[in-house]
Image (cartoon, rainbow, N blue to C red):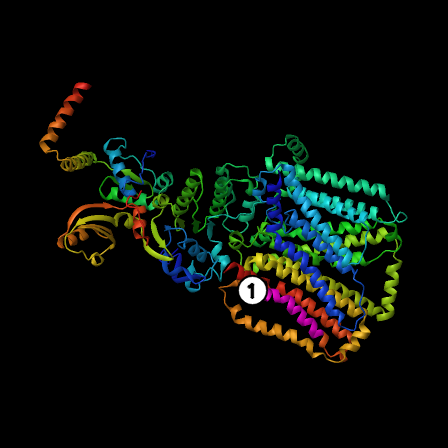
């Protein structure tokens, strides 16, 4: 399979290290299905030249992804999306939602909104949304 | 109404260039007079002031002024293009911008030339003749300014046109000044020639400033330019030769940047004597003074370069800056590239001058004086001696010519090491004055060798005071010279080269002349040769010091 | 190519100008195959350091070794393996671009003429134009072509983006990446544009007033710089805390700037009875400002 162009977007000011941004974005792409199993990822040097970042950063991201089981490498051929990532995908999605919820709870706490009110608000908005579509 | 811009322009011209102007105005005549006063003490019959050498100095100074006022920098590779940009932005009409520098330069230069001719050279012209000379200088200034604005795209073309105009101007002036009987062209043609050069010069200068101010908006000019210069011939300049390695590349670079300056100067300065071939008087009894002078014209190069450094506006140079210093070449390779350049440009210049001299001799169609000169020489020295004397003359000429070339080249390097605004003029004008002095002394020694011999038979130890003082100064500077932190200490020994030359000369005089007059003369030649070679020998060291601070 | 031997080895380098130290006992090693970013304010000594590496300055005290050689003693061998773009390129303005590339090519054995031609083509300017007629950005890009065309082992860029348009700046970053993706080649980049430095460099050198403030990998710099807000009633001996290099006090609240293992530090603080109010990673800009010996630092930094 020919490798695709990864549409990654790195932000300088987010405070998140670039390699982590790559890792999480690749995970999202795999989780959302835009990267299919056994699909080849761009070579490190190609991605580095495209994003204009240091190849070591890309290399580290790929290493992390491989260590976590999202990618596998074939010597001399490159990095490919590993199979069996669906469970990872679900796990990733859940983890992401958990993060969101956590920050939501923290923020609500700062604003002195109780968890009960928060749940009520969520239900109201959900009803409104389903009525509106 | 125009007082403010005129004041601003005048301040720009005279204010920023004041040290260059002061230096060029005062130092050569002072050196000249000091030398004469010093020589007056010797039991040598005083010679009249209108020596060829004084004329030489005059030409050098006049050219120097012309360059200062036209904001021209002949030292190659420099950013050419007339005035600094901020002058163009002055709220003054364009004709004023063109006129004021011309007026200032012409009046100053003419004033200097005429005063020199009157007091130093002792040549007295009447008012009409002085006006003619002033007019010629004015038209030359116009042309210089016009060319400096890059009116023509090719530098070679600019130089050629300038040379042609210089010849026409000189011819016209001499036609107007000479007597009716000896006049080849006649006064009318002289007047026409002068008028043409003056008017076209003024017009072109004005056109050039317009173009510089408004950008390339003169459509007809661009049209003409496109027609004339679109053919491949003019793009010859931009073709790149195949360069085998770094050394070849650097040689190419040095020649392109610096190599054509000396030959160019020689071409321009050769225009004068070539013009004088036209005269009846010269045709029948040629004076070999002027062609011989040409061979020593390299001296004018030193002041041309040195004095110009003083002007704040002419301080942009192609130097051994970051670009030059980061070439992947060793220090010796860079130094040899520069030396090779110096030798090559000297040879080309010498060839040009020889060509001028040959044309001159052929044009005068009379070699009677040449023959009589040779027979006199044979009588004095014998036939072998005559050939040896010729060889000696050639060596002295070469050595002294190399001197100016070497100082010209080494000034480029000195300029990096020293604060050229403060010391560049010192180096070059001091050296220039010294070489003129050396030459004059040598000539006088030769002419009055009998009485000089007698005087020098007994030692005159009071003359040693000066060299002892210099030696002491040198010893005091030695420990400071060791420190690499301040390369500015280099300028003091450099300035002292002139003093060192005087030292050697005095040593020559104090030589025990029991060995004979020829020995003293030989020593003179040797010291001059050494002094000219020392800058070349120092060049690898200079490059090293310049490149690695 | 032995990766162990550093490509540049500077030991106790000191340089004074008129008695003032532009470089003060600087010791750094640059290993191969990395992109080094030197960050510092104007006048910090970055250019002076680079000039020492190029052999333009002799080491007054200490030593400089590039590719294992002294650049002052052996300028030819050292400079033929370096591609250099200075802050204010002083290329000969009378040369056309074609002449310039031809001239530069003669100096390097590994000059690739077709690669050079391709690079110049990307600049999209007439090769028969004189360099003096180009804009500053175009000049810098042409200079960059010449610096890259012989595939140097070390690419040295001294504040390359100063005063350049975004296209030219992008080209410079591309050149940096293109160099370092090939094995064994290194880049030395000095800049005060921290965004670019963050993007392409993997090693960082903070420079201020002639001294090295920090020499770390980019990862470490980005991950371990933190600002912690704590509340503690007792006086806090912050100098004793590992990794804390700066602290400001506002009553019982302290702002601590640290470069350390954050978990360990927070534990230590808790042990001392401090209440952790907030902790956040510092951006590169903030980290540099916090480390610089400046008196007035704005509380709000970009």
Q: Which residues are magenta?
A: B492-508
Q: Is B501 a magenta residue?
A: yes
Q: Chain of mark 1?
A: B
Q: Nearer the viewer, residue C76 or C283?
A: C283
Residue B245 lies in the magenta-colored region:
no
The residue to which callout 1 is attached is: B490
Whole-percent x, y for residue C281 in the image: 25, 46
Among the 4 quarters of the image, the one containing residue B448: bottom right
Q: How many neighbours does mark 1 have within 10 angstroms: few (below 14), some (14-19), or many (20 or more)?
A: many
Residue under the image location 82 percent in, 48 percent down? B174
Q: Is residue B134 left or right of residue C286?
A: right
| C205 versus A63 height, above or below | below
Query: Helix, strand, or loop for circle 1?
Result: helix
Q: Position of residue C210 (x, y in %)?
A: 38, 57
Across and down, in percent, residue A62 comes to 28, 42
Q: Residue furthest right?
A: B181
Residue at left offset 79%, top offset 56%: B291
Which of the pair C47/B46 is nearer the observer?
B46
| Residue B161 in which image quadrant | top right
The count of marks equals 1
Magenta span: chief secondary structure: helix
């Amino acid at each position: 399979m020919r490798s695709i162009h990864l549409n990654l977007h790195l932000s300088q000011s987010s405070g998140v290290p670039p390699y982590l941004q790559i890792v999480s974005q690749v995970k999202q792409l795999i989780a959302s299905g835009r990267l299919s199993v056994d699909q080849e990822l761009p070579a490190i040097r190609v991605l580095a030249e495209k994003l204009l970042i240091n190849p070591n950063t890309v290399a580290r991201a790929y290493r992390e992804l491989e260590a976590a089981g999202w990618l596998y490498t074939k010597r001399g051929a490159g990095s490919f999306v590993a199979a069996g990532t669906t469970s990872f995908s679900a796990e990733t999605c859940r983890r992401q939602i958990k993060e969101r919820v956590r920050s939501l709870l923290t923020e609500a706490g700062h604003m002195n909104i109780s968890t009960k009110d928060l749940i009520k608000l969520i239900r109201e908005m959900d009803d409104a949304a389903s009525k509106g579509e | 109404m125009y007082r403010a811009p005129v004041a601003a322009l005048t301040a720009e011209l005279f204010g920023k260039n004041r040290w260059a102007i002061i230096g060029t105005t005062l130092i050569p005549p002072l050196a000249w007079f000091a030398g004469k006063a010093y020589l007056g003490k010797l039991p040598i019959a005083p010679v009249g002031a209108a020596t060829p050498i004084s004329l030489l100095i005059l030409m050098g100074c006049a050219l120097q002024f012309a360059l200062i006022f036209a904001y021209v920098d002949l030292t190659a590779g420099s950013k050419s293009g007339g005035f600094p940009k901020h002058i163009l932005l002055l709220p003054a009409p364009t004709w004023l911008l063109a006129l004021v520098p011309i007026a200032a330069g012409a009046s100053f230069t003419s004033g200097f030339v005429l005063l020199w001719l009157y007091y130093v050279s002792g040549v007295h012209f009447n008012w009409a003749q002085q006006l003619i000379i002033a007019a010629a200088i004015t038209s030359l200034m116009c042309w210089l300014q016009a060319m400096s604005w890059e009116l023509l795209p090719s530098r070679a073309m600019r130089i050629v046109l300038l040379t042609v105009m210089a010849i026409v101007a000189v011819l016209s002036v001499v036609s107007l000044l000479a007597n009716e009987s000896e006049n080849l062209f006649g006064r009318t043609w002289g007047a026409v020639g002068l008028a043409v050069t003056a008017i076209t010069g003024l017009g072109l200068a004005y056109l050039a400033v317009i173009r510089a101010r408004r950008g390339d908006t003169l459509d007809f000019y661009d049209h003409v330019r496109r027609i004339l210069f679109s053919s491949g011939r003019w793009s010859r300049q931009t073709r790149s030769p195949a360069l085998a390695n770094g050394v070849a590349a650097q040689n190419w670079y040095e020649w392109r940047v610096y190599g054509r300056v000396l030959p160019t100067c020689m071409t321009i300065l050769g225009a004068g004597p070539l013009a004088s071939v036209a005269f009846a008087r010269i045709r029948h009894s040629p004076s070999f003074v002027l062609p011989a002078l040409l061979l020593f014209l390299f001296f004018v190069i030193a002041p041309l370069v040195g004095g110009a450094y003083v002007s704040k506006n002419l301080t942009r140079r192609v130097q051994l800056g970051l670009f030059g210093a980061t070439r992947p070449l060793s220090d010796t390779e860079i130094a040899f590239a520069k030396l090779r350049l110096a030798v090559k440009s000297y040879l080309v210049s010498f060839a040009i001058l020889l060509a001028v001299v040959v044309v001159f001799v052929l044009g005068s169609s009379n070699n009677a004086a040449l023959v009589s000169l040779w027979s006199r020489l044979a009588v004095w020295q014998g036939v072998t001696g005559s050939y040896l004397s010729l060889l000696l003359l050639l060596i002295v000429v070469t050595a002294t010519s190399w001197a100016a070339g070497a100082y010209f080249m080494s000034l480029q390097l000195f300029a990096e090491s020293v604060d050229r605004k403060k010391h560049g003029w010192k180096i070059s004008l001091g050296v220039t004055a010294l070489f003129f002095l050396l030459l004059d002394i040598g000539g006088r020694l030769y002419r009055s060798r009998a009485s000089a011999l007698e005087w020098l038979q007994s030692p005159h130890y009071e003359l040693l005071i000066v060299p002892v003082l210099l030696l002491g100064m040198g010893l005091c500077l030695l420990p400071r010279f060791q420190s690499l932190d301040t390369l500015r200490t280099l300028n003091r020994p450099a300035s002292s080269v002139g003093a060192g030359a005087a030292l050697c000369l005095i040593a020559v005089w104090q030589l025990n002349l029991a060995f004979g007059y020829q020995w003293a003369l030989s020593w003179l030649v040797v010291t001059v040769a050494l002094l000219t070679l020392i800058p070349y020998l120092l060049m690898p060291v200079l490059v090293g010091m310049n490149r690695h601070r | 190519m032995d990766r162990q031997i550093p490509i540049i080895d500077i030991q106790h380098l000191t340089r004074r100008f008129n008695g003032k130290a532009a470089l003060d006992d600087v010791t750094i090693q640059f290993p191969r195959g990395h992109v080094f970013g030197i960050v510092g304010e104007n006048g910090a000594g970055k250019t002076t350091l680079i000039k020492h590496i190029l052999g333009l300055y002799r080491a007054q005290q200490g030593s400089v070794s590039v590719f294992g050689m002294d650049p002052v003693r052996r300028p030819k061998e050292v400079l033929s393996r370096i591609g250099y773009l200075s802050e204010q390129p002083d290329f000969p303005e009378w040369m056309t671009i074609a002449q310039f590339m031809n001239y530069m090519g003669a100096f390097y054995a590994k000059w690739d003429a077709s690669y050079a031609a391709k690079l110049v083509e990307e600049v999209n300017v007439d090769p028969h134009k004189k360099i003096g007629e180009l804009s500053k950005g175009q000049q810098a890009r042409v200079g960059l072509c010449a610096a890259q065309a012989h595939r140097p082992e070390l690419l040295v860029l001294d504040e390359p983006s100063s005063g350049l348009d975004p296209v030219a700046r992008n080209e410079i970053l591309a050149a940096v990446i293109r160099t370092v993706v090939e094995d064994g080649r290194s880049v030395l980049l000095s800049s005060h544009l921290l965004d670019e430095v963050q993007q392409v460099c993997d090693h960082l050198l903070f420079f201020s007033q002639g001294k090295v403030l920090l020499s770390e990998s980019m990862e470490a710099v980005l991950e371990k710089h933190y600002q912690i807000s704590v509340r503690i009633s007792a006086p806090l001996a912050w100098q004793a805390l590992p990794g804390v290099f700066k602290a400001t006090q506002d009553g019982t609240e302290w702002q601590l700037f640290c470069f350390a293992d954050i978990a360990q530090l927070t534990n230590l603080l808790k042990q001392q009875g401090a209440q952790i109010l907030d902790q956040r990673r510092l951006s590169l800009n903030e980290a540099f400002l916090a480390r610089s010996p400046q008196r007035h630092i704005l509380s709000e930094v970009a």
